[in-house]
Image (spheres, rainbow, N blue to C red):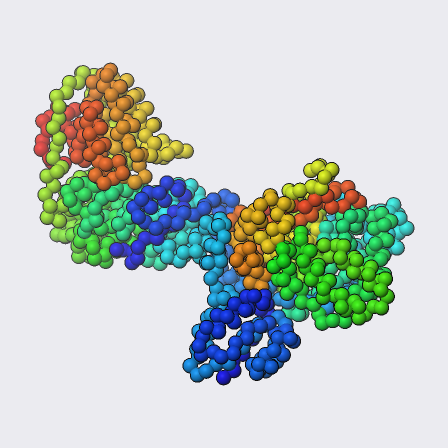
Amino acid sequence: MITIIVKENAYFDSITLMKVSQELRKIKALREVQVVMGTDHNRSLLKNSNLWSDEAKNAKANDLCIAFSSKIGFNKQEVLKIVEDVLYGHQEAKKSAFPLENRPKTIANAVAQNANINLAFISVPGEYAAYEAKCALNKNINVMMFSDNVSIADEKKLKQIAAKKNLLMMGPDCGTAIINGIGLGFSNKVRSGNIGIVGASGTGIQEISILLDRLGLGISQAIGTGSRDLKKEIGALSMKQGLKLLAGDVQTEIIIIVSKPPDDQVAKDILQQAVAIKKPIVVCFLGKEEDSNMMDHHISFAGNLTQSASKAARLAGVSDHLFDFPKIPDYFLQKSQKKIYGLFCGGTLCIEAQNMIGPQHTCIDFGDDKYTRGKPHPMIDPTPRNEAFMELAAKDDTAIILFDIVLGFGSHEDPASNLSPIIQKINDRKKIIFIASVCGCEKDPQCYSDQVNKLKSVGVIVAPSNAIAAQIAQSIINNKSLAKHKV
Amino acid sequence: MILPTKLDILNIGNPLFKDDLEAQGAKVTHLDWKPAAGGNREFIPYLESLENDPKIKQANKLAVEKLLSSQAFLTDMMLAGEAIPDFNKNTILHAGPPISWGKMSGPLRAAILGAIVFEGLANNLNEAEQKVTDHEFIFDSCHNHNTVGPMAGVTSYSMPVFIVENKTHNNKAFCNVNEGLGKVLRYGANSKEVITKLQWIKNTLYPILKKAIRQGPPINLNTLISQSLHMGDECHNRNKAATSLFTRIIVPSLLEVETDNKKIKEVIDFLNSNDHFFLNLSMATAKACLDAAHNIPYSTLVTTMSRNGTEFGIKVSGLKDQWFTGPANYVKGLLFSGYTDDDCNPDIGDSAITETFGVGGFAMAAAPAIVQFVGGSVKDALNYSNSMYDITLTENIAFSIPNLNFRGTPTGIDLKKVIELDRLPVINTGIAHKHPGIGMIGAGVVYPPKVCFEKAFKAFVKMQ
């Protein structure tokens, strides 16, 4: 059988065409093969080889002629594929044949080079972040947006697109997530397990996950939503999406919801969704007491992060004894020393502490916009907070400095060593009580126990959690005995 | 797992996050990010809506099809006034966007005066200038008349032009004959010897060459360009191979149509002594192919880039015949000995049509012999071509580049991508002396002013 395929105005040089012929001759079912441009000379060659048809007759000098005779059993598709491969194919191979700079510049570029990309981690300045996120969602890529400074309107629009496409839109201002075992942003190397977290609070997620890790429990997924997700304007679009995913995730057996107290209607919506999920759920709307209207037995409430971890642990059948109070060494305070000052890197840790020690004491969040404008986050660069330690030490009313140390990916490589000389310097001059918690786990790059020991070596009381640290501070200042573990 | 497959992460922003992710064994691609549209917040919201507009996608697909299916043939030569529609005896076409006499640069003015003398419409340059100020002439852009011309691009009534036909889409483009190097009209020289050479072209070269072209079958110029790209040309700043190939094709016909050996030798010597003879054919090919892709509603394909020595102008397929202009830049490159930056005229000529077509600077990787103009190393040349793939709609597999492993040249500048990536098309070009009559003083690389693309983008947005 004679087959002649003519592609009009498809000029190829003769070497390329020889390569096509060579490849086609490898097909056993083909006998005679000619792949030529349709010049007069070439067409007479075709005619002489009996590879002739009306198509060949009408071909022009710039028409590509693929002509062959074949035995029974030849596969035209196979032939065409080989032709296409040699002529147009192997673009990937072509691109990498020379060591040229081919890093993708746009999301579209990146997807063209790697169609498997399924999550974009965005940390560009806020004014450009929404555009990049939109591009990613349009390409069906999940988004974690670390960037803040994105307008509420953009946030809502992005989350609506994501919901419609059933994609995750974590953030803007989402600092922490653990997805499919990979920690994103500020996150800790906690073990994998059966507890899923969805949270509008980065350090909230970190604190809960490391506490569970310390109890031998693990995280299935930790989905961040960004700090504003539970505001009325956004309506918890990301949290709802996150809950839906956790509800359907077979590895997740227990769910923890964590956020600052949300808008009332938003809280209602979330709880309504939670009621419908047939998994035990711990709800922590920081500082908010149990909702007495919620009588559903599979939902329990926690007032702080430590409690959330405790309740989840009990649901998982694990004792939470590791959260016991540490031993407090003897201390002596001057009469003027009346105040607790909290210096925090973690925003949620700051709020949690402030809730517990009361408004007569002061907690400062160094991760707040007004301290980070144009500067790295204090988890990355502790310098601005270190300076505050020195300033507070000089104040007469400072009794206790309460602080956090946040470990994990994204954080400073050795925050305890960075801070301890400053504490030592203060100790040399004055008696101030330092109480800290270290938000981290053993496998973090900074190693939890190393960091704890470094702090202890300069006399810092290290509590097992932020809430316990705050409670110790409060007990000391109120000169109460330290009740055992009632956080 | 909530995502059904392993995480495959695209990191956009701080590279430290990439390190953290990789330390956990995740697969990460780091985006070589910079703010979209160069951070222009006025444009950013539109990038995405234009990118996802099905009308634009469809229009660009059609434009690309038209561009890539175009086959340009050299079929004939005629006098400009006979060939080009609506051409009066007092019409003078010039390179670049339309410009008034008062704003023209020195070389362009001088070339126009020379053309007036050549046409016999004035006895000398002074008289020519007087007649110009008396408004006796109509000046217009070559591009507005399916015509292109290198450097000053001055084309007057009785100058011979090549007729290049896009046989796929039945449109024609015209271009004058390249005069060679040295003192030439296109660089603003207009002395007696320049006029004499123009007369020789008209009276000796033209009749013979016209007959020779008509003698053989139409010459497929697309094919000729493909071949010359494999021989070290990029068909803007280097046309050595293409000129040689053209000579090889035309000489047998010359011998058939002319018996006067002396004349034949003159013609062959002329072809032989001018490595840029083919430039004008390369430009007309580009023009004929791009015109077929012009005027497709909603297409963001750039169909013209051109300069008149004062302004740079572009046209966009979906924006009809509107020019979008900005001040022409200065060319960065190598100058012949004895010249300094102070001697250079701003960028001039229609020859940037070659880049618009996907050759010239876009095919720099094919022409390592002239890398001295662009930085010196072959890798620089490869990178110039390589960096243009990001701003083009397609690759022209018919124009393959051996040094890029036979990848097709980046083809079809996309207005959207130029704005989104804030990356301008690269143009290889010659440098004219700012004073008339001195000619070419170097060659190098130049970029269009960004404002042309910004204006066009705004017009596009407005049209939506």
- Residue B117: horizontal and vertical position, in percent? 86, 52
Task: Pick whichever, B333 or B268, lies toward us.
Answer: B268
Q: Residue at x 26, y 49 (%)?
A: A181
Q: Is residue A153 left or right of residue B440?
A: left
In the rendered image, residue A136, in percent from the top left (x then y), is placed at 40, 53
Q: Quadrant of the C terminus of chain A?
A: top left
Q: Is residue A175 left or right of residue A39?
A: left
Tell me: residue A193, above or below residue A409. Answer: below
Q: Is residue B383 left or right of residue A237?
A: right
Residue in the image at 81% along x and 65% along y: B208
Image point 14% across, 45% down: which residue? A313
Asked whether B369 or B373 is in front, the reply is B369
In this rendering, the answer to whether B429 lies above or below A39 is above
Q: Quadrant of residue A50?
A: bottom right
Furthest residue toward right: B123
Residue B299 is situated, as x and y percent measured from the top left of the image, at 56, 60
The reply to whether residue B299 is visible in this rendering is no
Q: Is residue A76 visible?
A: yes
Residue at horizontal 74 percent and vertical 71 percent from the top = B216
Q: How many marks?
A: 0
On the picture, is B205 further left or further right than A261? Answer: right
Q: Position of residue B19 (x, y in %)?
A: 35, 43
Relative depth, front residue between B26 and B35? B26
* Up/down of A402 relative to B289, above or below: above
